[in-house]
Amino acid sequence: MKAEILVIGALGNVGCEVVKELQAKGISVRAADLFPEKINERFGAGVEAVGFDFAKPETYQAAFHGIKKMFLLRPPQITDIQKMMVPALEAAKAAGVIHIVFLSLIGIESNTVVPHYKVELWLRASGLSYTFLRASFFMQNLNTVHRAEIRDLDIIEVPVGSAKTSFLDTRDIGAVAAVALTETGHENQAYDLTGSEALDYYQVAEQFSEVLGRKITYTNPSPIKFFIRLVQRGTKIIFAVIQTWLYNNTRKGMADTVTGEVKRLLGRDPIKLKQYIEDYKLNWKKD
């Protein structure tokens, strides 16, 4: 059966979970990313793999042909939405895409300078139907962005003071996205997705310590010290600025909102942080 649902960024933390959820529902899916050969390695031959790059219009036709609905995310390196994403979105619309599920940010109404906001504006004006998944802080950032510091140094180093965060598992985002892509009633909706609890990083460190069986310490650096450490570790200046800015918003209490949207949409509680740590604990195992 020819795929009618496309997942952009299928190899990423969220995109891969969307593909898995659609597979579990028995849905034929086309998975797109920069390296299509890796898609079938991860998901098997049952997924239709295509190469896709926002910067390469020659990849658009194979990705969008025959597609009615798609999951969309913004690659972190893209900041100029009009130049780098809109041409692809226009091509998708011209090819017959009618509904887009977009991974956005919680609190975007007061963060109108972020690129996600511009994508939302375009989608609202496009004539396409849309679902905005406005997600809180990913748990999986702790096993990707912060993996080395936890594994090698036994620390969590983020500049948020004692502010709380409503951590969200990307597996829950994938499950919600699959619902929005396969069921009716989600057209032109925006969902604020969070976990079921808001925790400060002292509590996060305690849960890591309990599950990993060794002391993990939250260092609580200043934003300036955090930024300097990022640059010293080789992070590009622009990404260091963005990361520090996002954590500064958390420090101001902008990430502590807890909603019931995940439970309402999935009919179950969101995955808790402790369960996430258990499931991913090999990521922080010392060599």
Image: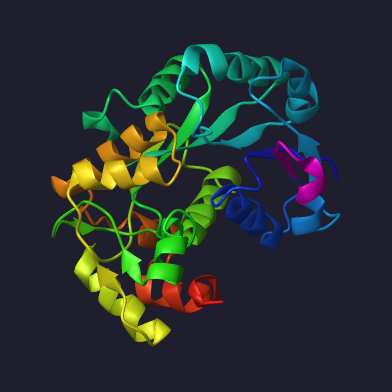
Color style of the picture: rainbow
Residue 91: image quadrant is: top right
Please give the name of the residue rendered at 78% of the width and 17% of the height, measured from the top-left corner. Answer: 58
Seen in the picture, residue 277 relative to 33 is either above or below; the reply is: below
Q: Quadrant of the N terminus?
A: top right
Left or right of 88 in this view: 242: left
Where residue 54 appears, as percent x and y from the top left, is: 64, 23
Seen in the picture, residue 166 relative to 30 is either above or below; the reply is: below
Q: Which residues are magenta?
A: 30-39
Residue 268 visible to an observer of this rendering? no
Please give the name of the residue rendered at 52% of the width and 45% of the height, measured from the top-left corner. Answer: 180
Q: Quadrant of the C terminus?
A: bottom right
Q: Nearer the viewer, residue 185 or 137?
A: 137
Left or right of 187 in this view: 272: left
Where residue 23 appears, as percent x and y from the top left, is: 71, 57
Seen in the picture, residue 1 relative to 218 is either above or below; the reply is: above
Residue 172 visible to an observer of this rendering? yes
Residue 33: image quadrant is: top right
Q: Nearer the viewer, residue 33 or 98?
A: 33
Where residue 110 appears, as percent x and y from the top left, is: 21, 30
Seen in the picture, residue 251 relative to 131 is either above or below; the reply is: below
Q: Nearer the viewer, residue 30 or 39?
A: 39
